[in-house]
Amino acid sequence: MDRPTPASPTDHGRARAGGRFTLRAWGVSQGVRLAGFAAARLAVEAAGRGGDLLASAERRARRRSRRRQAAALRLARLLGDLKGPFAKAGQFASLRVDVLEPEVREAFLTLQDRVPPLPLAAVAGVIESELGAPLASLFAHFEPTPIGAASVAQVHRARLHDGQEVAVKVQYPWLARSLPADLAWARRLLRWLGGRTPDRERLFAEFAAGLAEELDFLHEADVAEEIAANLAGEPQVVVPRVHRSLSSRRVLTVDWRPVIPIGDRAALEARGVPLRDVVAVLGRAYAKQVFVDGLFHADPHPGNLFVIDEPDASVRPRVLFVDFGLSKRLDPGLRREMRLGVHALLRQDVPAFLDGMERVGMIAPGARAGVQRAVEEMFARIRSEGAPLGLGGGQVLALKDEAKRLLSETPGLQLPAELLLWAKTLSYLFALGARLDPDADLMRTTVPYLLRWLAERD
């Protein structure tokens, strides 16, 4: 009888990634944990309503608000633990200013694309099966402890055999098999979270399409290289080089550099990094992506932006962009309507602004009158601040908060996910600039690119 062929490390990797997560692939483990949350939520709500009977109307409203917020925080922690589509569903829900109550949305912001990591043993099989070789032959050294963990993957430092330091992003092992079941549960979850909107299926389609792109790391590599080419004229912006031979749909290997987190102001100041220069670099980079290129890195939170730690950092700081999984290419038609909308805003032409909103499906049938009142209020607020293109960063952030309030209080106003990501990206950018250097004029940096965009002709 022939002797069985010895199993290769790659075979073992596939076995580990397959057998261990069977219940997840069937949707059982997710269902059990979500059902446990729902049962606990019902019990807490039943007990709370009993206490509500003895409370005044005002106190009863406060008690219910606190229960909703506490439940949302517990759900956010659960979604972070489940990772994949669940963490993404929470992040997606946090954008829906037009759908969710503020206390629920704020709870999901705690996800911030940072979730508990897995041990190396749980993800090594993905690397070996995807790249077709044992870990030791692929890398001279591989750090077992990840340097970061997000909703669909975690990142490890490693060293190639030629001495090059790299960062290896590896997808969680169950995602490929469990995605259909995960999406089925996520659909139910988003239906529950988006209970106020009649357009649930469109919301889910937007969510699922975005997730499919994020799970394809070769697509992310393509986007990173395209953005790097677009920003090649900005020497203070760095996009890590992709190692194609060590990358696949579920593994992405890029150059690693020593860095200082952009949110660590104390470390940047101790290193002598001029924070105003960092804000200017960020402003130019994002203004070019958003207004000129139409393809932009849509996740500018501090975990994805760094200052490279090098001798020249105190004179000419360079900013490193990482994680292009959440990037967005604006539809040309939407981009044109956005440009026409800014022209209408500058002219204070409310009817033209509303016409554009209707053309892109932002106003539900029969809701134009109510939306018009909100737009008129917003235009008046902008007019009171002065010339729109002359606003400072603090004024922009204040107007952003006012716009969020109007969105949440205006029935029939529904925003495309692309536009929400565009607005969120600019909002994050202005908030980050204000934290780094409150006196930096980020608006002045972006205006030349904005004017170039406004001057475009179709």
Image: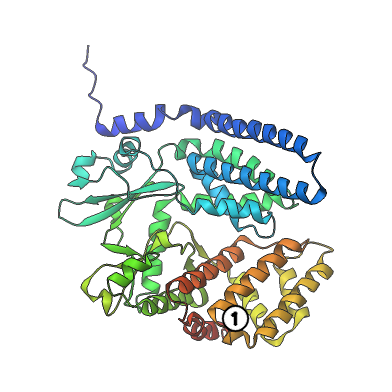
Residue drawn at point x = 30 percent, y = 57 percent: 254
Residue 114 visible? The answer is yes
Whether residue 374 sits left or right of residue 438 in the image: it is: right
Whether residue 418 sits left or right of residue 384 in the image: it is: left
Looking at the rendered structure, the kind of residue marked 1 is Asp
The image position of residue 196, as x and y in percent, is 74, 51
The image position of residue 15, as x and y in percent, is 35, 28
What residue did someone put label 1 on? 458
On the rendered image, what quadrant is the C terminus found in?
Answer: bottom right
Q: Residue furthest top?
A: 1
Comparing 110 with 216, the one in front is 110
Indicate the quadrant where residue 361 lies: bottom right
Comparing 414 with 113, the one in front is 113
Indicate the quadrant where residue 182 lies: top right
SS under mark 1: loop
Residue drawn at point x = 67 percent, y = 35 percent: 44
Indicate the quadrant where residue 235 lies: bottom left
Residue drawn at point x = 26 percent, y = 62 percent: 257
Residue drawn at point x = 33 percent, y = 42 percent: 130
**Image position of 292 with respect to 175: above or below:** below
The image position of residue 98, as x and y in percent, is 69, 60
The image position of residue 410, as x and y in percent, is 76, 64
Instruction: Report the label total.
Output: 1
Residue 206 visible? The answer is no
On the rendered image, what quadrant is the N terminus found in?
Answer: top left
Whether residue 272 sits left or right of residue 264 in the image: it is: left
Scheme of colours in the image? rainbow
Mark 1 surroundings: few (<14), some (14-19) or many (≥20) residues within 10 A: few
**Image position of 160 with respect to 21: above or below:** below
**Image position of 135 with respect to 296: above or below:** above
